[in-house]
Image (cartoon, helix red, strand yellow):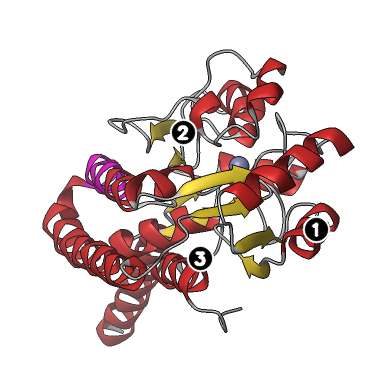
């Protein structure tokens, strides 16, 4: 009799522990883009599940979340925004309205921003007339070393605030990540050293901070977020020739037809890149190599 009672108690205790551990396993943070998931997972380790909103192949400038994703955001312990990218400008208010208790962290805090109008070098003196959106900063901070450090630091602080008990664990992971970022910086510097032509063309200005950091010039096909007119395209081709551009970068989320046309007209190499890749270090190194290596692709 007594023995069965103890067994029942043990069984109940076992169930209780199982449920308890399940709850800690269920902690979630939501981020906007894949590179953020990279940084967050490196720091969170096994303490949080990182849920990413913008799916692979979609543009974070224009993406709309599915109802299922909105539910998932509601189940999160926090939202880590990259800063001011299109999706966040349109949806963050609604997300906070729907989830008044959701903690929101801005990972761009402390970043020295580049103004929107300085993201691309001007196509030509005459093209100066067109209007750039007033105010607004370039949101593509993650595609750079400084930006990665800012994002990593703010991510660390977010996890510490959410889960103070594991502060030492997050610090250890952060230190490892920081070493990887430094190593990536060294590698890119080395790769770019012999580079002669320091200008490149890209459809959407996703490499603004990368260009600033490594002394490169970014020429953009997109004009104020829109497809260029034939006249603008003509100017761009002229500017590209003047700058001795050798590479046109293609991004899967954006139009490729104009990129192909420009490459043909200027004799540039076409290289597919993905600044939104989860593999942050690998992709930045790939971009650096593509600027230098004739065979890269
Ligand atoms: Zn963008």
Question: Tag 3 or tag 2, which sits nearer the N-term?
Answer: 2
What residue did someone put label 2 on?
A: 83
- Read off the magenta span: 151-163
Task: Looking at the picture, tell me which residue is in the foreground, 198 or 72.
Answer: 198
Residue 32 % position (x, y): 55, 46
Quarter of the picture containing the N terminus is bottom left
Corner quadrant of residue 131: top right
**Residue 275 is inside the magenta segment:** no
Report the mark closest to the observer, 2 or 1. 1
Task: Looking at the picture, tell me which residue is in the foreground, 86 or 98.
Answer: 86
What residue did someone put label 3 on?
A: 278
Question: Tag 1 or tag 2, which sits nearer the N-term?
Answer: 2
Residue 243 % position (x, y): 55, 49
Residue 257 % position (x, y): 85, 57
Left or right of 209 on screen, residue 129:
right
Q: Does residue 287 lie above or below 2 as drawn?
A: above
**Residue 152 is inside the magenta segment:** yes
User: Between marks 2 and 1, how big is the CA–CA gap?
Assistant: 27 Å
Which residue is rendered at x = 29% and y = 47% of the image?
Answer: 146
What residue did someone put label 1 on?
A: 256
Q: Residues within 10 Å of mark 1 (few under 14, many from 20)?
A: some
Judged from this view, the residue extending furthest toward the front is 242
- Ligand 1 falls in which quarter? top right
User: Residue 92, can we see it?
Assistant: yes
Which residue is rendered at x = 53% and y = 46% of the image?
Answer: 218
Which element is circle 1 on?
loop
Q: Does residue 265 lie above or below 183 as drawn?
A: above
Which residue is rendered at x = 67% and y = 57% of the image?
Answer: 55
Task: Looking at the picture, tell me which residue is in the foreground, 212 or 123.
Answer: 123
Which element is circle 3 on?
loop
Corner quadrant of residue 263: bottom right
């Amino acid at each position: 009799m007594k023995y069965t009672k103890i067994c029942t108690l043990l069984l109940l205790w076992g169930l209780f522990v199982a449920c308890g551990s399940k709850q800690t396993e269920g902690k979630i943070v939501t981020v906007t883009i894949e590179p953020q998931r990279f940084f967050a997972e490196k720091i969170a380790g096994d303490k949080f599940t990182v849920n990413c909103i913008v799916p692979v192949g979609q543009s974070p400038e224009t993406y709309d979340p599915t109802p299922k994703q909105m539910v998932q955001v509601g189940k999160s312990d926090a939202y880590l925004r990259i800063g001011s990218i299109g999706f966040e400008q349109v949806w963050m208010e609604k997300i906070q309205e729907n989830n008044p208790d959701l903690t929101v962290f801005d990972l761009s805090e402390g970043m020295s921003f580049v103004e929107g109008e300085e993201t691309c070098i001007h196509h030509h003196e005459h093209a100066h007339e067109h209007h750039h959106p007033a105010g607004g900063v370039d949101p593509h901070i993650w595609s750079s070393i400084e930006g990665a450090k800012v994002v990593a630091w703010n991510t660390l602080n977010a996890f510490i605030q959410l889960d103070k008990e594991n502060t030492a664990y997050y610090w250890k992971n952060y230190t490892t990540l920081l070493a990887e970022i430094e190593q990536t910086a060294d590698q890119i510097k080395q790769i770019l050293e012999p580079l002669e032509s320091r200008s490149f063309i890209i459809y959407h200005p996703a490499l603004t901070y990368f260009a600033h950091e490594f002394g490169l010039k970014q020429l953009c096909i997109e004009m104020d977020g829109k497809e260029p007119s034939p006249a603008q395209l003509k100017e761009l081709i002229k500017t590209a020739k003047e700058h001795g551009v050798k590479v046109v970068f293609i991004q899967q989320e954006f139009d490729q037809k104009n990129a192909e046309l420009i490459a043909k007209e200027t004799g540039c190499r076409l290289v597919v890149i993905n600044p939104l890749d989860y593999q942050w270090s690998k992709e930045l190194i790939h971009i650096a190599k593509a600027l230098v290596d004739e065979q890269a692709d």
